[in-house]
Image (cartoon, coloured by chain):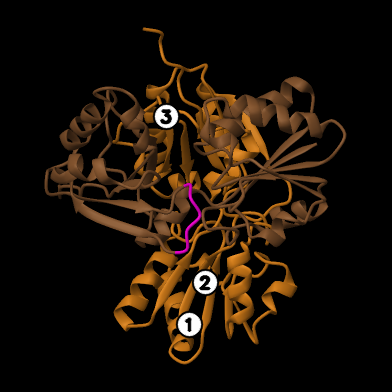
Chain colours: A orange, B brown
Amino acid sequence: MVTIIGLGISSGEHLTLEGLRLLKSCDVIFAPRGALPEPLLRLAADFRDTSAFYHQPETERLLTEAVLAEARSRSVAVCTVGHPLIFDKPVAALKEACRRAGVPCKVLPGVSAVDAVLCELGFAADQEGFQARQAAHIPGTKIDASLPLFVFRCNALAAKAGLAGRFVAAVTKAYPPGHYASFVETAHVPRQVALVDSFPLKDLEKKLASAPAEATLFIPPLKKKKK
Amino acid sequence: MVTIIGLGISSGEHLTLEGLRLLKSCDVIFAPRGALPEPLLRLAADFRDTSAFYHQPETERLLTEAVLAEARSRSVAVCTVGHPLIFDKPVAALKEACRRAGVPCKVLPGVSAVDAVLCELGFAADQEGFQARQAAHIPGTKIDASLPLFVFRCNALAAKAGLAGRFVAAVTKAYPPGHYASFVETAHVPRQVALVDSFPLKDLEKKLASAPAEATLFIPPLKKKKK
C-alpha cells in the first residue's frame, strides 16, 4: 500500500492533519530530507531520503523501484513538496507504476505552489479564475491575458537553445511592456521567508536570467476595457 | 489581528499544522459550523458560526462587521472551506476591509477545490498546466481546450436567464460531442465520500440541470494532433 502525501511548500507547516495521521500509521516514509522537520520524519520505523533521486535524470525509475520494493509487504508513505499531482512528474510515474504492479495507491491533496503564491501576493482569484502553465509549453500557444497567470519551471527554459527567447517573445506579445509581473520564490523549495520581485514586463528577459531557480512567475490579468 | 485560514475541502482533515497552531493561539474563531470537528472549534475561548452569513446577499458586510468588531482588541481566526483566496468573495472583501481599517490581516494557504478534485480523479497536472474558471465567465470568452479545465460555480448559471444555454454552447463548441467530462462533488462542502459523475459532453445540458449544487465540472484536455 502506497500513500502519496503533499507536504505543501513551507517545511512541514502545510502538512495536513490527514497527512500527519497517515505518517503516524505507516511503516516507511520516503521524503526529501529537509522537507519535514526531523521529528516528523521519524514517525515511522524507517526513513528513506529521496532528495538524491530528484537531481538526476532517472528520478522516476529510481523512486519507483525503491518504493515498490517496500510496498508489497509494508505500508509506505511517499512525501512530496507541494501538491503531489501538480507539476510533479516522478509522482505521476510512481502512481502509474503502482497501478501496473497491482499495488493500491492513494494520493492525498496538499497546498500547491499556486495556493502559496496567492497568499504571498495577497491576490484573490475570486473573479474569472486563473491559469497555471509550465514555462516550456508557453511558446507556440496563445496566452489568455484576461486570466491571472502562474508560470512554473522557468528554470527549464535554459535547457533548450532559443527557448527562453521564444518564451519572452510570447509573453511580451500578450501584455503591454509596462504591465507588472512578479517572481515569487516559494514554489518547490521549503522556505521561511518568501522573496517577491516585481518588475515591468519589458524587463522580463533580464529578470529571467537572474531569477531564483525555483521561482514562480505571476502575471496579473489585463484590466478589461469598459464596454 | 485577523488571520484567515483555509480549512481545505474535507471537514477538518485538510487543516494544516500551521492553521492548527494558529487556532490554538487566537481568542475568537469564526467558522461555518460543520466545517471543523467540534473540538477544533472550541480551541479558542469564543466561537462564532458564520454559516448563516454565507446564505444571504449581505454576506460580505455581515462577516466584515462581525470580524472587525472583535479584531481591534483580540486576535481573530476566520476559517473558510477550501483556499481563502480562490473563489471566496467574502474573504477578499474582508481582507480589503482590514486594510482600510488598519487592522493587520494575514492569509494562510489551504487545500483548494482544484487540489482535491485532482486527487479524486487521479489526474496529474504535470504536463502543460491547467486552468480554473468560474462558469458564469465562460460565455463570451475562448476556452483553451489544450489545458485541463476546472469549472466552478455551475450553480450560478441559473441566476440569469439564458446564461446556462450560452455556457453549454461555449463548452460544446470547444470540444467534440464524445469528449468526456466529470462533475465532482467535493468542492466547497465538506464530505466524507466524493461523487464523480462522468459523461460525454453532448449530455452536458441535461447533466447541468441535475448536477449537485456544489459540484465542480472537470474537462480533460483534448489530445494534441501528432505533427
On the image, the x and y values in percent for residue A136 come to: 38, 44
Q: Where does the image place residue A175, in percent across and percent down from the top left?
A: 43, 21
Above or below, comparing residue B153 to residue A31 in the picture: above
Q: Is residue B130 left or right of residue A121?
A: left
* Residue identifier under label 3: A128
Around disc 1, counting alpha carbons within 10 Å, would you say few (fewer than 14), some (14 to 19), or many (20 or more)?
few
Can residue A121 be seen here? The reply is yes
Which region shows up in magenta? B188-192
- Is tag 3's residue or tag 2's residue first in the polypeptide sequence? 2
Please give the residue where the numbered disc 1 appears in the rendered image.
A66
- Residues tagged 1 and 2 counted as in contact (Cβ below 8 A): yes
Task: Say which label, 1 or 2, has the lower sequence index.
Answer: 2
Quick one: B75 or B132, which is closer to the camera? Answer: B75
Q: Tell me which amino acid carries mark 1.
A: Ala
Give B177 or A36, whichever is nearer the viewer: B177
**Residue lying farthest to the bottom in this orientation:** A73
Tag nearer the camera, 3 or 1: 3
The quarter holding residue A170 reads top left
Whether residue B198 sits left or right of residue B77 in the image: it is left
Task: Output the chain of dot 3.
Answer: A
Task: Identify the chain of the residue marked 1, using the numbered disc in the image.
Answer: A
The crowding category of the residue bearing disc 2, from other C-alpha atoms within 10 Å (few below 14, some 14 to 19, many at least 20), is some
Chain under callout 2: A
**Residue drawn at x 45%, y 20% as measured from the top left:** A222
What residue is drawn where x is 63% and y is 24%?
B61
Residue to which mark 2 is pinned: A53
Asked if residue B21 is positioned above or below residue A146 in the image, the reply reads below
Residue B75, quarter of the rendered image: top right
Give the residue type that dot 3 points to. Glu
